Image: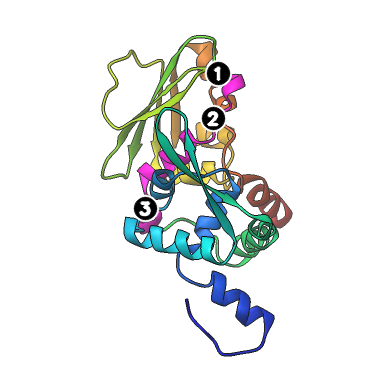
Amino acid sequence: MTAYGQYCPIAQALELLGDRWTLLIIRDMLTGTQHFNDFLHGLPGISRALLAKRLRHLERVGIIEKHTKDSGRKTTEYHLTQSGQELDAIINSLLLWGIKWSFGDPRADQLDPLLLMWWIHDRVNMDELPSQQVVVQFDFSGASRDTYWLVMSAAEVMLCLTDPGYETNVLVSADLATFFKLWLGQIEYEEALQERTITVDGMPRLVQSFPNWFAWSLAAPAVRAARQAAS
């Protein structure tokens, strides 16, 4: 924690929140992340040791609480306290500021397909899925590792890095940068289909319902609104 030595509420708030990764941890907690390994999946680049250090700091200053559950095996969950929940307005303000001043086309070093798939798997509209299990294969061009699978049912969603052994029901072929932009609301689904930067193949009824299976990024509505206001 950096001490600024200033009797100023902004400086004192930054002493609690200004370390690298801290606000991204808060961002993910505000969208439902509670478990240590889930933080690691959503924050590629942070080490286990640094994540543990950041979580201990946030717990020590009263922004999060740690709860241990024992339902057959012990699990640890992290929850925001009231002070942590009130950071929602700050995160949302950063979102809007970032869209306006720093959010352009993605750079190559920002295109992590595994992170994108983690986000996708975490934002499935379970109520919109078909009654039977559905397997979606994602083939990304422009990625070092280019194929991923989602095995989805009303009970669970599994992200697979190797062929799960089930028949693929829907095949999505996409330029990785384009799918990131679609996920974040920078382009529309129909626009990407028309430009053939994304293709979706499978049974017609599944292809038609495919975009409804996902809630897309929580940032997408604000990105779309800014794009429409600028057009």
Left or right of 52 on screen, residue 25:
right
What label does residue 44 carry, if any?
Answer: 3
Left or right of 143 on screen, residue 204:
right
Question: How far across and how far down the image is residue 129, in percent?
Answer: 55, 18
Q: Are marks 2 and 1 in contact (CB under 8 Å)?
A: yes
Question: How far across and how far down the image is residue 41, in percent?
Answer: 39, 45
Asked whether 67 or 92 is in front, the reply is 67
Q: Earlier in the sequence, mark 3 or mark 1?
A: 3
Q: Earlier in the sequence, mark 2 or mark 3?
A: 3
What's the amino acid at mark 3? Pro
Asked whether 125 or 32 is in front, the reply is 32
- Residue topped by disc 1: 129
Q: Are marks 3 and 1 in contact (CB under 8 Å)?
A: no
Q: CA distance from mark 3 to mark 1?
A: 29 Å
Residue depth check, mark 3 versus mark 1: number of the one nearer the observer: 3
Q: CA distance from mark 2 to mark 1?
A: 8 Å
Asked whether 111 or 218 is in front, the reply is 218
> Measured along the vertical axis of the image, is residue 68 above or below residue 159?
below
Q: Which residues are magenta?
A: 108-128
Question: How far across and how far down the image is residue 53, in percent?
Answer: 40, 63
What residue lies at 50% left-to-right and 36% top-to-bottom? 122
In what element is the residue under mark 3? loop
